[in-house]
Image (cartoon, helix red, strand yellow):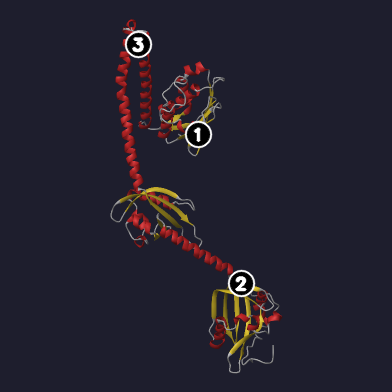
Amino acid sequence: MGATGPHRSGTTDTSSLTDGAFRAAFDSMPDSLAIFSAVREADGEIVDFRCEYLNPAAAQWTGAEPSALVGHRLLEMLPSYRGSALFDDYCRVVEEGETLIRSGFDFEDQFIGGRYQQGAYDGWASKLGDGMVLAWREVTARKRDAEALRASEELFRGVFHRSAVGMALLDSRGRCLRANAALGHLLGLAPQELEGHSFERYVHPEDQACFGQRCGAAPPEIAVQAEVRCRRADGKVVWTLMSCAEAASEASPDSLRVLQVVDIGPRKEAEAELARSNADLEQFAYAASHDLQEPLRMVTGYLQLLERRHAEQLDGEAAEYIGFAVDGAGRMKELIQGLLTYCRAGTQQTALAACELETVVDRVLGNLGAAIAESQAQITRDPLPVVLGDQTQLVQLLQNLLGNAIKFRHPDRRVTVHLTAEADDGQAVLSIADNGIGIEPAHLAAIFQPFRRLHTRQDYPGSGMGLAIVERIVQRHGGAIEVASQPGAGTRFTVRLPLGS
């Protein structure tokens, strides 16, 4: 240091702090620590600070040897501090004795002979004699994480409050901690009026048990849903779809839940109207089909009577016309009976009971005995389970599928059909695979439609109602049916039915 310039009008005795136990304590600190003494003008004004001590952590942080910094002035080491607000703060620490604490401040500079530093720091300065003790710790990662968390929380608040879907944050007891405007609008209340109250109070009494079970048992990160009626502030009942999921939070010891509430009232009204319309249409189809049978039977009867009694008076052309009419009436009768069967398949009220599929298959094989013998079909099966169903309808279902396997057989090979079954999540998965002519993949989606035919009546007779009836029966049992096929490679139907005990 030069002999000219500012002199030191005060002293900072660091001997007791830099020797013995204190020195060992400072040297072992993980935080950076330095001791500076004030450098004053003749009039006593502080114009700089002289470094008296740096601990190893501080020296390592600067990137310079301690000997290159101890004894040097602060403004020599960091020229950018001259005239800065931070330098003025250091002066007040020494002059007024107030401790300076700064959290998360940004630092970007380079010590003389050291490395360039840029980051966020926590620091404090405290008066020591006619000088000060400085300590600092880098918190760049912590500050970055805190800013990311703050941005995430702002994003969540924005999504939460601006969402068109009703949302609420519930505590472990179901109390509403926060609600958005959409939920308030749905329930006819201001969001603040919902907060602090159990959300169950807004649920219809008949649905409160369902709401409690679903929201009380929401597993982490997996949303559970329930259709629940809510009561608005004006007393009106609205149907809602509620989705509830655990909101994981390390910061909160309590289990929080995010509740989403969607108004499905219009959908429920549309479903009810569709159900009424379908019921009316089904009733009309049933009644029309039933009432058509008698006049059709009369037409057929009189045509056949005309053919028998006046055969000698009819020429060949007239006899042919009568034959066409009788044949057409027969096809119409077949269609009407198929439509009646289709209607009955969805409306029968017989209670479902445990049915042994082995017994069902035995009955089907008996009913198809003549067709099996005529085609020399080979029908095999693995052990089959007990299912929950209507035995009469299950016979009808399997008879249609096995009958189709025999009807649509390949002309160049013997018919083989194999039935297998396995259990899956409370259901019996029944597979019926044949080696018949197969189906074009483009037609698979249409084969369950009523009156849908892929072949002419001359090639394969029938009403086109068989698979529609099969699907109707499966739906009535709460199951599902799928089909896989390729032309010439056979067909596999997979039917899911509820397992019985």
Q: What is the secondary structure assignment of the residue under circle 3?
A: helix
How many marks the image carries: the answer is: 3
- The answer to which image quadrant residue 305 occupies is top left
Q: Earlier in the sequence, mark 1 or mark 3?
A: 3
Residue under pointer 2: 118
Q: Which residue is mark 1?
A: 429
Label 1 sits on what residue type? Answer: Val
Asked where in the image residue 48 lies, by quadrant, the reply is bottom right
Among numbered discs 2 and 1, the one appearing first in the sequence: 2
Give the vertical position of 155 relative to 79 (above or below): above
Q: Is residue 345 above or below residue 414?
A: below
The residue lying toward the viewer, choosing from 373 and 462, is 462
Q: Which residue is mark 3?
A: 318
Q: Residues within 10 Å of mark 3 (few under 14, many from 20)?
A: few
Q: Nearer the viewer, residue 282 or 58?
A: 282
Query: What is the three-letter code of the residue carrying label 3?
Result: Ala
From the image, state whether disc 3 or disc 2 is nearer to you: 3
